[in-house]
Amino acid sequence: MGSTSHLEINHSRMLLARPEKVFKAFRDQNLLKKWWGPKGFTNTFHEFNFTEGGLWKYTMHGPNGMDFENQSKFVKITPNERLLIRHLEPDHVFTLEITMKIADEGYTRIGWSMVFETIEDYNEAKPFVKEANEQNLDRLENLISSM
């Protein structure tokens, strides 16, 4: 299989929490609703089957009043270590890999890697997704610090 580096967007962050706490922010849909998405977004979850092969259907409500329907599938779940999520529709087909690695003194390094299916999806998402992902990680970090 060839390199996908030309289709990837990567982020990482050190979080002051153990991997178990970070994983809980993904596993618990009531927590996930609070932080998922860029700054100012809220979520309505229609289906959240947090099992391998399970579907996650949700609407992201933007601060400008626009709604964004989403459907994803949980491909791989390794508790406290890794999530592999396939974003299916309606736009920007990609795979999101989230890794959680223990670091020094109670920190977790979270990795956030998106690999887009096509160069067209990558080019369309690239201008906004880098900042949006950083805002998403900011919101995760704020939630974890309040848990």
Image (cartoon, rainbow, N blue to C red):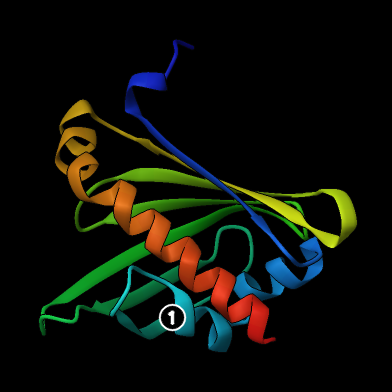
Q: Nearer the viewer, residue 62 or 14?
A: 14
Task: Give the SS element for disc 1.
Answer: strand
Nearer to us in this view, 136 or 46: 136
Q: Quadrant of residue 72?
A: bottom left
Q: Is residue 114 above or below residue 5?
A: below
Q: Nearer the viewer, residue 43 or 70?
A: 43
In the displayed image of the protein, which residue is found farthest to the top? 2
The picture places residue 71, in percent across and down from the top left corner, at 34, 65
Instruction: From the image, tell me which residue sits under label 1.
Output: 47
The amino acid sitting under disc 1 is: Glu
Q: Residues within 10 Å of mark 1 (few under 14, many from 20)?
A: few
Q: Residue at x 43, y 72 (%)?
A: 36
Please, which residue is most extreme toward the right here?
105
- The image quarter containing residue 89 is bottom left
Where residue 29 sits: x, y (%)? 55, 83
In this view, the residue in front, 41 or 91, is 41
Residue 99 lies left or right of residue 116; in this view the side is: right
Q: Is 4 above or below relative to 42?
A: above
Q: Is residue 27 left or right of residue 38?
A: right
Judge whether 130 appears above or below 72 on screen. Answer: above
Q: Residue at x 28, y 50 (%)?
A: 129
Residue 42 x, y percent position in the rendering = 32, 84
The residue located at (58%, 80%) in the rendering is 143
Residue 53 image point, x, y percent: 56, 58
The residue located at (18%, 43%) in the rendering is 127
- Snapshot quadrant of residue 44: bottom left
